[in-house]
Each structure stands twice: as structure tokens, then as C-alpha cells.
Amino acid sequence: MDRSSKLLLRKVIVDFLCIAVVGLTVLMFFLFGKPYKRGFFCNDESLYHPYHGSTVTSLMLYVVGICLPVFTIITGEYLHARHCTEQTGKVLFGYSIPLWIYNAYEKVGVFLFGTACTVLITDIAKYSIGRLRPHFMTLCVPNVNCTLAKNQHWYIQDFVCTASGITAKQLKEMRLSFPSGHSSFSAYTMVYLAIYLQLRMRWKGSRLLKHFLQLICLLTAWFTAMSRISDYKHHWSDVLAGSTLGVISALVVTFFVANLFGEEKKHSEKHTAEKHQSNDYETEMGIQDESSPLQARTQSYGGINNNTEDPVHN
């Protein structure tokens, strides 16, 4: 195995290990995590909302939030490579890997790593805080008589849910309100996608199409966040915190991990340098051309032409 193949293989293995470690940690939270046991006040009206299903389901969230950006990135790198003069690919085990496949691998890998990190940060906050959801009282029906005056302003921690048909998963989920996972996930994936479109979409057929698509991305994240409030899955502050977390994660991954615009800046600087070299060469050639008649006039000054032989000696 040649050195370049070893380096590339090591890079791929390390990348997959990083994503796998973060992803497995998220999975451990989902399977075995126990949220903080937070109590409640009987007079807290924010906990008495009805229980509704999700307008944006988890399956819908993950399919759209992962598949759409990944498909866009792969398509964008393929189209970008068709118009790119630098076509030097990578070599692995003697096989040449096209440049667009390698670039797509890098950008998709960074996007997925950022996705896993965003979910992990959200889960750490969820399980550490254990905030009760707005439908807590409806779903749990705690064995506490909230009509008694002594319980109105008393922080109650010792209680048992008495609602019939409630599952262990629901008992766990009703303590995971802050921050909103749907909001942070949708904000990260859609903001990242909007920034990627700004980088790669260069179609000159319309000035507004790119910005229209970016608007759709942002509206998708906005609608997802608002639906969590209208479905009484989260308090407004949960959604605000989740969306802020997602936007910050997208910006950090874009500018400091993926460094999307750093690559574009290098190509721009290289193109500018080549253009300046070409202009300098053309200017130099023009000066030489202009100086040639002057030299000819100097040589023939006074009626003497050095290039003309003396007819007396012929």
C-alpha cells in the first residue's frame, strides 16, 4: 500500500470513529438516559395544556433534515466539479477517486458530525434539566390534590402519575422539554443547507432562485419550531433556546469545522493572482513592442543606418 492510500484510509477511519462515538453517545441517552426528577407547582398554569400529537413527527424531521442536505451536497459537488479546472482526485488502493466524490465525502461527513454534536448537546441539556412539558398535568395526572390551599404554592416533588395507559416512554419524554430537540435539529440542518446553497449555487438564469430556496429552508425550520409550541410539546423558551443552539451550531460548523468559504477564498485568491500575472505579462510585452520603433529610430539617426551596407565596398 502506497503512502497516499495509507493517509487517506487513516483519515476515513478516524472520521468514521469520531461520528460513531458521538452517535453512540446519543443512542445511549435515548436507550438508558434518565432525566432529572423535577417537581412542579399546582398553580403553574403552563403545565395544564392538552396532549396533542406532533405536527412534525420525529421520522419526518430526521428524513427531511438529513436526506435533503446530503442529497443537495452530493449534487452540488458533482455540478461544481464539472466547471472546476482542478480535477486532481485521490488514489486509494490503486484506484482513482474523482475529486467530486472526495469533496462530497468531506462535506457530508462534516455535516453529519455537526448533526450528531447538535443532538448530543441538546440531549445533555434535556437530561440535566428535566423540565416538564406543557401537557404534563394532563398526561401524568399526579396523585396530588391541587384544589387544597396548602398545595397551591408548594413545590411538590413526591408524586406518582395515575393516568391510565401511560407508557414508560411517555413518562420519560414528559420531562424532556428544555431545549426543544426538533427546533435545534431543524435550525442546524436548514441553516447549514442555506449556507451551502450560498456557496455552491451559481446558476445565472435567475438572481432570486437561490435566495428563494434559502428562504424555504429557513421557513421549514421556523415552521417546525412554531409547531412545537402549538402542539403543546414545548414552552416558548424551550423553542427559543433550541433554535438558538441550532443556528450557532450551524455557524460554528460552517466557518470553523467545514470552513466552506475558506476553500472558496483560496480559489478566488489563486484566480486573482493568475489574472495579475497575465496582466503583468501583457503589459511587459506591450512596453517591449513600443520600445522597438524607438530603437530603430535611434539606430538610423543622422541618416546612418547600421543595417544598411556601404555601397562603396560592394
Image: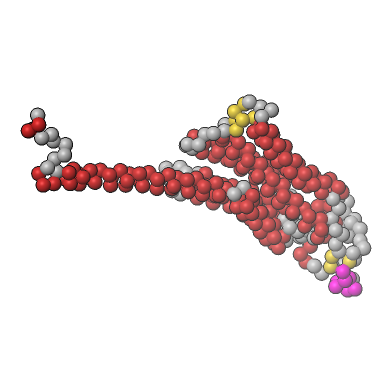
> Relative to residue 72, is residue 11 drawn left or right?
right
Q: Residue furthest top?
A: 94
What scheme was used to colour the molecule?
A: secondary structure
Q: Is residue 177 above or below residue 268?
A: below
List x then y, in percent, for residue 21. 77, 44
> Relative to residue 269, is residue 132 drawn left or right?
right
- Residue at (9%, 31%) from the top-left corner? 313
Where residue 281 sits, quadrant-wise, is top left
Q: Residue furthest left?
A: 312
Can residue 187 be seen? no
| Residue 211 highlighted magenta (yes or no) | no
Q: Give 5 or 71, whichever is nearer the viewer.
A: 5
Q: Is residue 183 above or below residue 13?
A: below
- Residue at (23%, 43%) from the top-left corner? 292
- The quarter of the picture where the N terminus appears is top right
List x then y, in percent, for residue 45. 78, 66
Q: Give 280 or 128, whichever is nearer the viewer.
A: 280
> Relative to residue 260, is residue 14 drawn left or right?
right
Q: Residue furthest front?
A: 313
- Residue at (87%, 69%) from the top-left corner? 155
Q: Give 285 or 143, whichever is nearer the viewer.
A: 285
- The quarter of the picture where the C terminus appears is top left
Q: How many discs mark residues in the rendered view?
A: 0
Can residue 300 be seen? yes
List x then y, in percent, for residue 55. 68, 49
Magenta segment, which residues?
A: 149-155
List x then y, in percent, for residue 82. 49, 34
- Residue at (64%, 49%) from the top-left corner? 257
